[in-house]
């Protein structure tokens, strides 16, 4: 015997270990990848194996033979049906944020009453099953320590479970999300009971029979007993009905539903669990028959439900007996904890919160938390009290079978939810109530405690009938089957009533819509039924009616931060997204039914059918773009086509803007974002008057013109070309418009599409071409003038030379010398003018460049550039201060370098006030020549510093600015192996820095070397 103190200490220690594991997983001290591994989900589904499996499975096998395997083959069949059942349920619960079966039926049938009945019946049906766990725990204490202390240990066990479950099952709002702590603890418990049960089976074979050979010999001597194990299966004495109810229990039991669908598992994890969970059940059942046979040999007079503990104890393996006790505690505690958590959430959501809405308006978070903790404690204490009041007769598994038959009553309703759109709320409620009544009469009543003088005659008759059925079964050599008749009768009554009542009256519109959402696989929630508030404040006011102003403000602010939505948002699409996020966030707190009721606005959004359709398209586009909806089949292929078309649209060089029939923007591309200066998320859903100037008026005018043309029976197509200022820069835009055909017969208009063509660069190019043509004409004219002036100038020079040679006095010769000097100056100016004109000339095809490369003094280049800019009499006069040493010599094309400094000095002159100083400084730095051209003029805005090197970008307001000087100068400098950069500040001036290699280190491009 093992002392009761040791058993009590083992119980407390084991629950402490579970607490540590749950705490570590919840605080992410266990790696998240491990805590959320698919195998953890498979092991957490192992909560299905309660004390029924651990202790009662051996007794069930003794009484009913191989029928015990049906308890595990049923879940295997359910896992095979994962694509048909589990995956569909997971999709619906994830999209609609549903956490329980009651949530699902309440959503599908749009009936709070259906959810309340489901939650209440789940609570009642689970009490016998919870009581079974306390009964198993107390019986295990009696087996190991003797009678007298089991009730105290059971009470302590109940208290400890209540504390653990209240702490990890009902969590504060700040910890909403996946229940990693509870799932990790349950998974660890499953692994522990599997390991212990396997060890007991191994010790049973080795200790009782001496090995597999001894077991085979013993079975050979008892061939009749072995054959009797298969007789119930051959006679179908409960085999088929047990398959049915265990099939349903695999995912309809509250603990199974909670771990599979409400714990945050994904599709991939569920797919892996679909094969790992049956393997776990198979491994768990392998020791059942060896333990049964070992117990039959060494303790035939003892009840088979205690063999898991008795066999190691009688074989003098006290450590294994203690481990087996801990395994039983593990099986019972896991079932009770998860069941209590699931039932507490369900009961709070569908039974208490709808009746206590007023109490939620103050300190809602604490009240909901303590409400759930109170429900958890009440469920555990209620199960323990039911066990204490229940007569302890019959097999341990009988209470579990009663609960299995009860939860099978949800099977017709679930099939209706998933596969039959014609089912109605009245049919579901009527069918479920009929099934509950049949179950109560056939299954629950025999378990109720006897109360002399207060029981109806039918209950006495029922109990006597059960006893007679057991006696008759024993007389004919087959075990009694007390669940087949209640199972098939209750399911037949349930399903027939559901079908008949549903066919008597068609479903309501909201039921049809919910049924469509449950059946389809491609698209998430529709917005046709959604009621969108007019503003964020209106949504917060609506929420305050349920949660109070403080909690409503907290929840709305949290949702706005998550979605990056401003407080003054009024676009229906963004408000709808905020409403959906509130529904998602509030569902763990008050349940999805109350959350949706609280988040919806009082009245549907205005706009008529066409406006609703336009808003629906925008909402659908938003969901698809964010990947919020899982698509399969043809829908996925259509979405790939949609993404490809959106990519094409995004890359168009024209701005595209689609305006819905409600006057709000439905679609834009990247080019339009750049033109307007706003992002897509700020534009889509916004009315046209929210656009920045001048686009609001421009687009509104185009939409009015297109709509007017459509009303007149025309296509509404046209174009308008305007000149506007955008971000301080002049833009030439051409806006094309066209009316769209309606996509739905409910809509009067399909909206308008606008194509915005930015013709600014094209217009500038046209102006520059005309300007270059004028410059070319001027150059040819200047060359002709220079040629004509050169002839008389030569004559003047000759006459002056003759005059100086023939003059007899010094004064006359001096004046002749002056004439010759001025004539030489005129000739130099003409030569510079001709050279500069030839630099900008376009060579004929095939002519190539006639570059003249040599040693060039930068001091002379700057001096010549200064002389050239002074020829423009209309330009402001500035004082050029040159500080370029004669030693600054480069290898290059003199004419091109002159052009560079002409452009730089002209820009500095145009940016300066008349009489200002422009400094040109040159030096040698790090083996290269650095020349700086500095002015103190207006400067260049910071946002244009990166753009001024682009062609046709100019800061000059007058038409003389072509925007080609700096790009051309940088190109020439780079061709000479140098760089050109600038520094500028508005109001302080600009410094252009030219860096060129010293003579002997110059790098010339291939064109110059030709």
Image: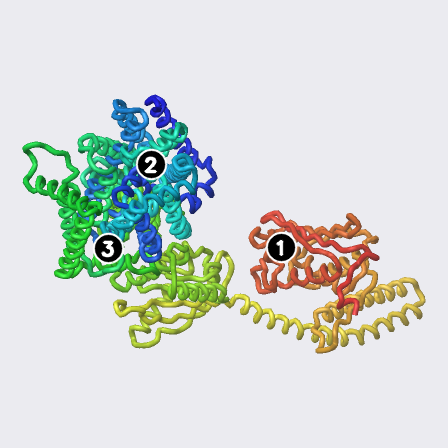
Q: How many marks?
A: 3
Say which element carries label 1: helix
The alpha-carbon separation of the residues under discs 2 and 3 comes to 74 Å
Dividing the image into 4 quarters, which one contains the C terminus? bottom right
Q: Is residue 10 above or below residue 850?
A: above
Q: Nearer the viewer, residue 463 or 552?
A: 463
Residue 470 location, x and y as percent?
17, 43
| Mark 2, other Cα within 10 Å: few <14 / some 14–19 / many ≥20 | some
Residue 962: quarter of image: bottom right
Left or right placement of residue 919 versus residue 170 in this view: right
Would you say the residues marked 2 and 1 are in contact, meaning their CB atoms lie under 8 Å apart? Answer: no
Residue 120 location, x and y as percent?
19, 42
The alpha-carbon separation of the residues under discs 2 and 1 comes to 111 Å
Which residue is label 3 attached to?
Answer: 604
Residue 142: quarter of image: top left
Residue 973 location, x and y as percent?
72, 59
Say which element carries label 3: loop
Say if residue 468 shows up in the picture. yes
């Amino acid at each position: 015997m093992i002392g009761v103190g040791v058993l009590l200490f083992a119980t407390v220690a084991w629950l402490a270990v579970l607490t540590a594991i749950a705490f570590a997983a919840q605080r992410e001290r266990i790696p998240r990848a491990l805590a959320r591994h698919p195998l953890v989900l498979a092991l957490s589904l192992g909560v299905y194996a309660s004390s029924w499996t651990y202790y009662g499975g051996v007794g069930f096998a003794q009484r009913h033979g191989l029928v015990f395997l049906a308890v595990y083959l049923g879940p295997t069949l359910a896992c095979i049906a994962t694509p048909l059942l589990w995956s569909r349920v997971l999709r619906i619960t994830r999209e609609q944020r549903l956490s329980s079966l009651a949530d699902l039926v309440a959503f599908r049938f749009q009936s709070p009453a259906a959810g309340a009945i489901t939650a209440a019946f789940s609570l009642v049906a689970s009490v016998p099953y919870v009581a079974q766990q306390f009964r198993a725990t107390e019986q295990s204490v009696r087996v190991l320590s003797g009678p007298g202390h089991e009730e105290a240990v059971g009470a302590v066990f109940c208290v400890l479970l209540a504390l653990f479950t209240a702490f990890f099952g009902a969590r504060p709002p700040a910890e909403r999300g996946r229940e990693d702590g509870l799932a990790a603890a349950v998974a660890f418990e499953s692994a522990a009971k599997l390991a212990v049960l396997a060890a007991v089976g191994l010790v049973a074979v080795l200790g009782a029979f001496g090995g597999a050979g001894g077991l085979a010999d013993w079975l050979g001597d008892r061939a009749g007993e072995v054959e009797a194990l298969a007789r119930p299966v051959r006679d179908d004495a409960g085999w088929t009905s047990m398959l049915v109810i265990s099939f349903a229990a695999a995912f309809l039991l509250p603990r199974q539903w909670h771990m599979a669908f409400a714990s945050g598992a994904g599709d991939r994890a569920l797919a892996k669990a679909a094969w790992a969970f049956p393997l776990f059940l198979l491994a768990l059942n392998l020791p059942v028959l060896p333990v049964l046979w070992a117990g039959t040999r060494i303790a035939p007079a003892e009840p088979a439900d205690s063999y898991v503990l008795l066999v190691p104890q009688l074989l003098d393996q006290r450590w294994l007996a203690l481990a087996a006790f801990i395994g039983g505690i593990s099986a019972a505690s896991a079932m009770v904890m998860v069941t209590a958590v699931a039932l507490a959430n369900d009961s709070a959501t569908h039974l208490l919160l709808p009746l206590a809405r007023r109490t939620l308006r103050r300190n809602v978070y604490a009240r909901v938390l303590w409400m759930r903790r109170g429900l958890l404690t009440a469920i555990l204490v209620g199960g323990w009290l039911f066990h204490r009041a229940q007569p302890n007769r019959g097999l341990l598994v009988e209470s579990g079978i009663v609960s299995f038959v009860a939860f099978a009553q949800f099977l017709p309703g679930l099939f209706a939810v998933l596969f039959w759109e014609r089912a109605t709320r009245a049919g579901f409620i009527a069918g479920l109530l009929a099934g509950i009544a049949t179950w109560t009469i056939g299954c629950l009543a025999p378990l109720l405690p006897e109360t002399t003088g207060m029981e109806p005659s039918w209950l006495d008759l029922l109990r006597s009938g059960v006893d007679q059925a057991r006696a008759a079964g024993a007389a004919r050599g087959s075990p009694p089957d007390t669940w087949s008749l209640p199972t098939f009768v209750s399911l037949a009554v349930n399903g027939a009533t559901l079908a008949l009542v549903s066919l008597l009256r068609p479903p309501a519109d909201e039921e049809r819509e919910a049924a469509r959402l449950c059946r389809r696989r491609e698209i998430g929630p529709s917005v046709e039924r959604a009621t969108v508030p007019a503003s964020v404040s209106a949504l917060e006011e609506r929420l305050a009616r349920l949660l109070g102003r403080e909690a409503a403000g907290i929840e709305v602010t949290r949702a706005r931060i998550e979605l990056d939505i401003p407080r003054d948002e009024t676009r229906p699409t963004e408000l709808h997204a905020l409403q959906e996020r509130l529904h998602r966030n509030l569902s763990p707190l008050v349940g999805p039914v109350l959350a949706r009721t609280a988040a919806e606005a009082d009245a549907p959004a205005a706009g008529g059918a066409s406006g609703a359709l336009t808003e629906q398209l925008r909402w659908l586009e938003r969901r698809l773009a964010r990947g919020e909806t899982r698509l399969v089949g043809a829908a996925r292929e259509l979405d790939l086509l949609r993404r490809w078309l959106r990519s094409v649209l995004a890359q168009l060089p024209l701005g595209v803007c689609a305006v819905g029939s409600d006057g709000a923007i439905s679609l834009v591309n990247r080019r339009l974002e750049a033109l307007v200066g706003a992002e897509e998320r700020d534009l889509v859903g916004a009315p046209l008057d929210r656009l920045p100037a001048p686009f609001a008026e421009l687009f509104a005018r185009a939409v009015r013109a297109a709509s007017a043309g459509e009303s007149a029976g025309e296509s509404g197509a046209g174009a308008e070309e305007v000149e506007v200022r955008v971000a301080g820069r002049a833009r030439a835009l051409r806006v094309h418009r066209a009316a769209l055909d309606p996509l739905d017969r409910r809509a009067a208009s399909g909206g308008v599409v606008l194509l915005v063509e930015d013709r600014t660069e094209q217009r500038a190019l046209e102006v520059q071409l005309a300007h270059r043509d004028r410059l070319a004409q001027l150059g040819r004219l200047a060359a002709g003038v220079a040629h004509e002036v050169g002839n008389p100038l030569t004559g003047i020079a000759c006459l002056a030379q003759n005059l100086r040679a023939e003059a007899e006095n010094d004064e006359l010769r001096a004046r002749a010398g002056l004439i010759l000097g001025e004539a030489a100056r005129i000739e130099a100016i003409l030569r510079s003018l001709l050279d500069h004109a030839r630099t900008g000339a376009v060579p004929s095809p095939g002519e190539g460049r006639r570059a003249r490369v040599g040693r060039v003094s930068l001091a002379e280049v700057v001096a010549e550039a200064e002389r050239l800019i002074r020829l423009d009499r209309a330009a402001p006069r500035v004082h050029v201060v040159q500080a370029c040493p004669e030693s600054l010599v480069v290898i290059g094309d003199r004419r091109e370098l002159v052009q560079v400094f002409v452009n730089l000095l002209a820009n500095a002159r145009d940016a300066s006030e008349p009489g200002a100083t422009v400094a040109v400084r040159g030096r040698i730095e790090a083996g290269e020549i650095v020349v700086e051209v500095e002015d103190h003029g207006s400067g260049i805005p910071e946002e244009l510093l990166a753009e001024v090197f682009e062609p046709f970008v100019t800061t000059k307001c007058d038409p003389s600015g072509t925007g080609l000087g700096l790009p051309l100068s940088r190109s020439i400098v780079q061709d000479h192996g140098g760089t050109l950069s600038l520094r500028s500040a508005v109001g302080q001036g600009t410094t252009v820095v030219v860096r060129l290699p010293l003579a002997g280190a110059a790098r010339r491009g291939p064109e110059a070397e030709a």
